[in-house]
Image: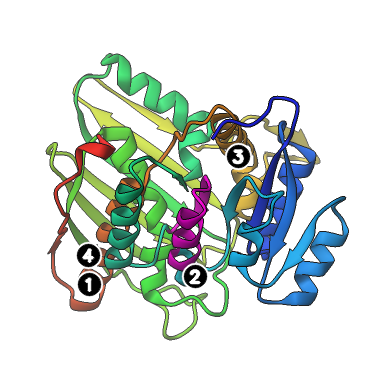
Amino acid sequence: MAVNPRDPLGVAVVGTGKMGADHVRRIQDVVNGARVSAVVDVDAERAKRIASGVDGCTAYTDPAAAMAAADVDAVLIASPGPAHEAALLTAFEHDLPVLCEKPLTPDAASALRVMEAELRLGHRRVQVGFMRRYDAEYMKLKSLLGTGQLGRPLMLHNRHRNAASPPFFTSSMLISDSVAHETDATRWLLGHEITAVTVLRPRPTASAPDDLQDPQFVVFETDGGAIVDVEMFVNCGFGYQVQAEIVCERGTARIGDGHAMVTNMAGRWGGTIAQDYVERFADAYDREVQAWVDATRRGEVTGPSVWDGYAAAAVCEAGVRALEEGVRVEVELVERPAFYR
């Protein structure tokens, strides 16, 4: 589907919580070539409130009704993960391009069903929202690794910290909702598949709820022989940090220090620390959505694929099992279809 260059792409945003509402703002105020023509939420009043702030936007409670609307050309899914499969399959029925926030779906079996449905279509329709691939620092690191100057990657160290976890967060969600990002970043940066996961359980922080295992130390093994670790700490107390350091045969590279500006005042020096992912990755989200809009208008689908979403789900499933059983768990993947190579 290519869009008339004179017409903005009509986007239905499914889910108007924190992420969805931010995407509505982004499409209206930041991204070129698109407009929000519909918003969908099970909370009818919230959907109406969001729609009322956008000219020509209609509020829906049913994703299928929004996708059938004549002014909807594409779909951005930002609803909770368990609702993604149904929304994706409905989008396929209308052959609509989709930007789906991670996770693609909450588990490997449902992700595989989505993949099989897209294969039946015969062409890609989904870009998965792994926004770190669009972050300036991550893109620079990926580019550096591509030059071969550092030699083969041997180890990748990751740190992922949140100031505080939401009240509904569970120990397994540290893997499925948070380490999921490092799962995709590892696969993308290294060009390896993750083959096994081990989760170590340090002494829990006193800042976490009694039933939350926080922090966690996750170790990935890859089919390229690299070892990857992730420090996952969702109640660090001081802010939101995402950092990565690659160790290669002939050198190392590190991103995420966040020292773009250092101030000196009142007997102190220092900088600021982002407080959440929306702030830290604002530019990455902007680039991600703009890239999706531009590709859709050209009649193309680029970026992370359904295979990437499926692989991440399979790794996270193995990670949750490793956490719960205290053992090393191998990742089980189906053979990668040529369609996604």
The numbered disc on residue 321 is 1
At label 4, the amino acid type is Ala
Which of the two labelled residues, at mark 3 and mark 4, occupies the earlier sequence position? 3
Q: CA distance from mark 1 to mark 3?
A: 33 Å
**Spatial separation of the CA atoms under disc 3 and disc 2:** 21 Å
Label 3: which secondary element? helix
Residue at horizontal 33%, vertical 52%? 230
Q: Which residue is mark 2?
A: 83
Q: Is residue 76 visible?
A: yes
The type of colouring in the image is rainbow
Residue 89, percent across and down? 44, 61
Query: Quick check: can you spot residue 19?
Result: no
Viewer-side label of 1, 2: 2
Q: Which residue is mark 4?
A: 318
> Residue at 80% across / 62% down in the picture?
50
**Mark 4 to mark 2: distance in Å?**
22 Å
Q: Is residue 93 above or below residue 167?
A: above
Q: Which residue is mark 3?
A: 289
Say which amino acid is labelled 3. Val
Looking at marks 4 and 2 on the same chain, the residue that comes earlier in the sequence is marked by: 2
Task: Identify the mark nearer the N-term, 1 or 2.
Answer: 2
On the rendered structure, is 311 left or right of 35? left
Left-right relation of 285 to 171: right
- Place of residue 117 in the rendered image (x, y in percent of width and height, measured from the top left): 33, 56
Of callouts 1 and 3, the N-terminal one: 3
At 81% across and 60% down in the image, what residue appears? 51
The residue segment tinted magenta is: 85-103
Residue 26, quarter of picture: top right
Disc 3/disc 4 C-alpha distance (Å):
30 Å
